[in-house]
Amino acid sequence: MRAPAELVSHVFRNPEAIQGFSMEDWDTLVRQGRKANLLARLHALLIQAELDAAIPAVARWHFEAATTLAETHQGEMRRELRRLRALLSGLDFPVVLLKGAAYVAADLPASKGRLIEDIDLLVPAERLGEVESALKDAAWQRVGLPEYDRRYYRRWRYDAPQLQHFRRAMMINLHHAIVPDSARYRPDANKLRRRATGIPGFAGLVVLASEDRILHVATLLFHDDGLSHGLRDLSDLDLLLRQAANETDFWPRLLARAEEMELDRPLFYALRYARHFFATPTPDEVREHLRHAEPGSATLKLMDGIYTRMLAPAHRSCMDALTPPARAATYLRTHWLRRPPRQLVPHLVYKAFISPYQREPNPA
Amino acid sequence: MKLLQLPPGELRRQLAGPGIWLRTGPFSLRVRSRLDAVAEGLGELYGQFEVRNPRETFADFHVSVDPQTKLRQGLRPKVNFSFDGIEPFEPEPLDQAYPMLERGLDWCVSEHAHQYLMIHAAVVEKNDQAVILPAAPDAGKSMLVAALVLSGWRLLSDELALVDRKTGWIHPLPRPICLKNESIPLIRAFNADAYFSGISRNSANGSIAYMRPPKESVRRQHEPAKPRWIIFPKWIASGELEVLPRSKQQTYQSLTQHAFNYSQLGTEGFRVCSALIKQTDCYDFQYSGLEEAVAVFDRLAASVVTGKAGH
């Protein structure tokens, strides 16, 4: 039987399928996996399933090199987090680690084969300045942005722009909320912080509770205009869900929290596409419970058409005639969710017609 | 089969269609291009390399060099290098199509092949002993390499030293040697039989020509070699030849700067670099005459066989 066009998630769902792969399939898998930033995670999966011996010799180095890179990233991340712990020890409030940094610090399965180039930190809005100046004292500097973007960030974005270390390649994104203040779905960051838990060995740094961590990824997936790491993020979500499912009362806790934070809709979509791509196990009661968050059947059909395309690896072999309109629709939709039209229209006009023709030097 | 066995029309047709599958050292490529300059360059320089029908075959790097799409084209047509949909370089004028392919291939390897410690350096070998020649701007590295391989040394690589992380040996990648500006006539004068591709002029670096890798080096492109020396060349227009020992500490620092993936390898990068320096002698080498320079290298290679010291 011919394997489907999108092979990365196909292998995640059926690792043993690789035993029947032709050389052409391996060629496609490596190219799609590289585009989706999932080669190292595929490698980890195949090792765990004791199938790595079936990787043909010519393709093997691609997986091994990706694993080498992921391991280096994680080692660097641990070192950086130890430095941060010392650096931020003077603050009288805990700093929340988000996404990749949190997975590594808490040693979660979602850190497996994960490339991490950024550290995402969540701090109270009124303490942003304090944290930024502590970082600046330790040679972390703001990344230069053109003037329009700088104003835009300050005004509308939920995060401060990135900080980069003057010698190391690592970046820090300093957030005070997990989506923009103007966004439709706007989880209260204070609520998230209150449930955060400490990490052994990293005093002063905390991670979100497992249900919040999942809601965070779910919300981000549907606010990210580029979805450049869509499948990777969805794979994170899959691994987070599989692990959290072992905790007592995880699913009721997740559903209650989604309702409290008004994130039923993003959770509905996240679980739907996690099941579609990664066959993530979700109990029937959960699906039943989220039925109220389901949009009308026409909308759902449209959303399926868009997101099954947008979340697939951005490789030619996964694209069809509907991929470009799906991409345009996602861009508009995420911006629509982020802010009202009164703000959105001028922004899109600026981005489409003015910024491509402006050349501003990037102040370093 | 070898690329030279493909009739030129067939090479052109395949490049413009499904692409050709080409093996260079440890890597396989699938190259596509609608440009004659690319077909000519490959035909002139890669004749000894193995090609296959690309269908049903695995390739490490899928690359293409093609004119920009009509929409993005200004008054002067430009070409773009693409690695499987990624365009790492700014588009360049049409006559840079072939050099862009070579640069693109270097980029593909240096961005991905972390199974090696990759150093921006040339590597040549004689009597089973390899010399690593780190690249520095205007150091005349490629000119020296061209002279050495025209004098019986084996070419392992002109641009990328691939150090096996387990064995510490160097894996060959004997692609064409890139010569610039005044080194082109100097090599022609050194050996009239040297085969060059057509010269591309308007590049930012002045003129560029590629020298075809020796047949024997291509035939042995799967035989790794043991590194014995690290030599930092410096070409001067006129002056005394000079060979000065270089401290291991200093060499280590330069190597980490010349390595493409030293930081990506983490502690492993440190380990491989240290092991490499431990087993090599390091020199600074200043030269102006090519015959004289080659003679020094020949004596160095002979010293290992006879067991005498280099100088």
Image (cartoon, rainbow, N blue to C red):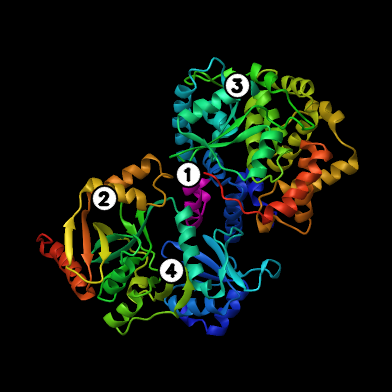
What residue does disc 1 label? A69
Q: Main secondary structure of the magenta part?
A: helix
Q: How far, Cα to Cα, is label 3 from label 1? A: 34 Å
Instruction: Using the image, determine if residue A245 lies above or below residue A359.
Output: above
- Boundaries of the magenta span: A52-69
Q: Could you give the CA–CA distance between mark 2 and mark 4, rounded to whole angstroms?
A: 27 Å
Left or right: B58 with respect to B142?
A: right
Q: CA distance from mark 2 to mark 1?
A: 25 Å
Q: Quadrant of residue B123?
A: bottom left
Query: Which secondary structure lies at badge 3?
Result: helix
**Res. A28 mark:** none
Q: Residue at x 87, y 36 (%)?
A: A295
**On-image quarter of the N terminus of chain A:** bottom right
Q: Is residue B77 above or below residue A293?
A: below
Q: Left or right: where does residue A223 sit relative to residue B123?
A: right
User: Which marked residue is nearer to the observer: mark 2 or mark 4?
Assistant: 4
Residue A321, percent across and down?
A: 78, 59
Q: Amino acid at mark 4?
A: Asn
Q: Nearer the viewer, residue A303 or A332?
A: A332
x and y percent of residue B131 in the render?
A: 26, 61
Verify CB contact (< 8 Å) between mark 3 and mark 2: no
- Tag 3 near tag 1, CB within 8 Å: no
Crowding around mark 2 (Cα neighbors within 10 Å: few <14, some 14 to 19, many 20+) is many
